[in-house]
């Protein structure tokens, strides 16, 4: 099993949920307000007067074969709106209950 952490501009929320739905990734945990900035491009997401946008973060645990289709769909979403910002990271899940 793999954990995918998806950090995205809040404007992507409905589209990210749609990606998870289309990929049969039912379960997830969401942190509604997260802050950050991209490593190379994009606007900071600080929720301040100067940088008012905010991010959300979702962590979902999926079977190994679900990872590539999810990442492919998320990458396409990011390419469509690059300035909004969307990143996904994958980790191994050693155990769960």
Image (spheres, grey):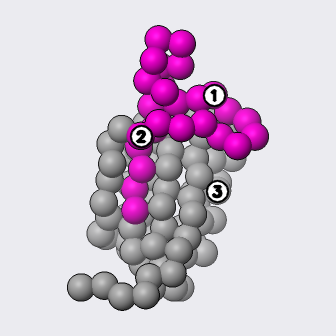
Q: Which residue does the numbered mark 1 point to in the structure image?
A: 43
- For image coordinates 67% across by 33% down, the residue present is 42
- Image x and y of residue 12, in percent: 47, 41
> On the image, numbered disc 3 is attached to which residue?
75
Residue in view at x 48 percent, y 61 percent: 5
Residue 22 visible (yes or no): no
Q: Residue at x 47, y 36 (%)?
A: 35
Please tell me whether residue 85 is drawn above or below residue 96 in the rendered image. above
Tell me the element at label 2. Answer: strand
Left or right: residue 83 compared with residue 61: right
Tell me the element at label 3.
helix
Is residue 80 rendered to the left or right of residue 3? right
Is residue 56 visible in this depiction of the protein? yes
Tag 1 and tag 3, C-beta contact below 8 Å: no
Quadrant where the N terminus lies? bottom left
Please name whichever residue, 75 or 6, is drawn nearer the observer in this view of the structure: 6
Q: In the image, which residues are magenta?
A: 34-59
């Amino acid at each position: 099993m793999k954990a995918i952490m998806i950090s995205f501009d809040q404007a992507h929320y409905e589209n990210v949920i749609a990606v998870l739905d289309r990929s049969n990734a039912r379960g997830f945990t969401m942190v509604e307000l997260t802050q950050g900035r991209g490593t190379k491009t994009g606007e900071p997401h600080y929720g301040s007067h100067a940088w008012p946008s905010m991010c959300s973060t979702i962590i979902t645990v999926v079977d190994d074969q679900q990872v590539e289709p999810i990442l492919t769909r998320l990458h396409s979403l990011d390419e469509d709106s690059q300035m909004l910002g969307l990143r996904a990271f994958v980790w191994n899940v050693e155990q769960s209950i």
